[in-house]
Image: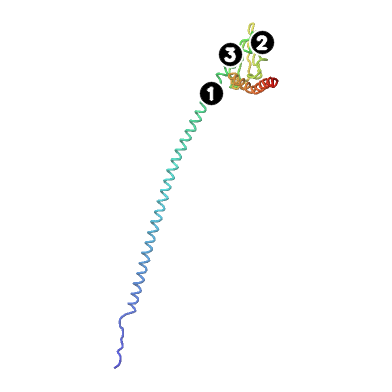
Amino acid sequence: MLPLLKINLLPYREALLAKKKKEFQTVILGAILIGLGLACLGYFYTDNLIRSHEQRIIQLQNGIAKLDEEIAQITKLKEERQNFIERQQKVEELSNRRFEAAHIIDTLNILAPMGLYITSIEAQNPNTYIINGRAYSDSRTAAFMSALPGRLFGTPELLNIRRINNAQEFSIKVYINNVEDQIEEETNPNQSNTAESTTQDPNTDSQQNSHNATPSAASN
């Protein structure tokens, strides 16, 4: 008996193409889904980075604003400190000027000879004064100008002199030396004396010890 032959009359080629087409569509769909997933992950990642950077920028801006406020406060404190120092210097200057004026008047009272009177003292600047006065002769004015140069006053300059009746009026410009040191020396003369006495005490003690030692040696 002869074997039977099997003949496939179905369209297998179309079925194979349809299968491959379906597999291709599945692969493309999977690739599309994977791409969409990666795109979503990238979007969320970049979005988180942008938000974190924005928050950091906001924090930096807040910190800069706070530093600006502190800098403004520091600048204000510096200005107040400078104003306080200037006021303190003005007060010290006024106090020194008060003692200086008294010292100048006392010195002029001592230097003015008999027959010469000082009528006014005008300050042109902190170191220059105009002395106006009246004298009965030229010799008294000359003697007064020659007595002015010293520790307090510099070389005087005669600005104006005119005779009125039996007297003459004069104007003299003088320059003031450093008065503060002189006032301190005059107000604290005891400190220098005590310093000199303390420096001289060791010599006197050694001399006393030597005098005391000689009798004892002679007695032995």
Going from the N terminus, do you reach mark 3 or mark 2 first? 3
Which residue is identified by label 1? Answer: 92
Q: Quadrant of residue 2?
A: bottom left
Looking at the rendered structure, the kind of residue marked 1 is Glu
Looking at the picture, how far across and down is residue 190, in whole percent? Answer: 59, 19
Q: Residue furthest front?
A: 220
Which residue is identified by label 3? Answer: 120
User: Which quadrant of the figure contains the C terminus?
Assistant: top right
Residue 140 circle label? 2
Measured in 3D between alpha carbons, the distance from the residue under mark 2 to the one under mark 1, in whole angstroms, is 37 Å
Looking at the rendered structure, the kind of residue marked 2 is Arg
Q: For the residue labelled by badge 2, is the local secondary structure a helix, a strand or a loop?
A: helix
- Residue at (40, 56) in percent of width and height: 45
Is the residue 173 above or below the residue 34 in the image? Answer: above
Looking at the picture, how far across and down is residue 106, in whole percent? Answer: 59, 14
- Residue at (39, 53) in percent of width and height: 48
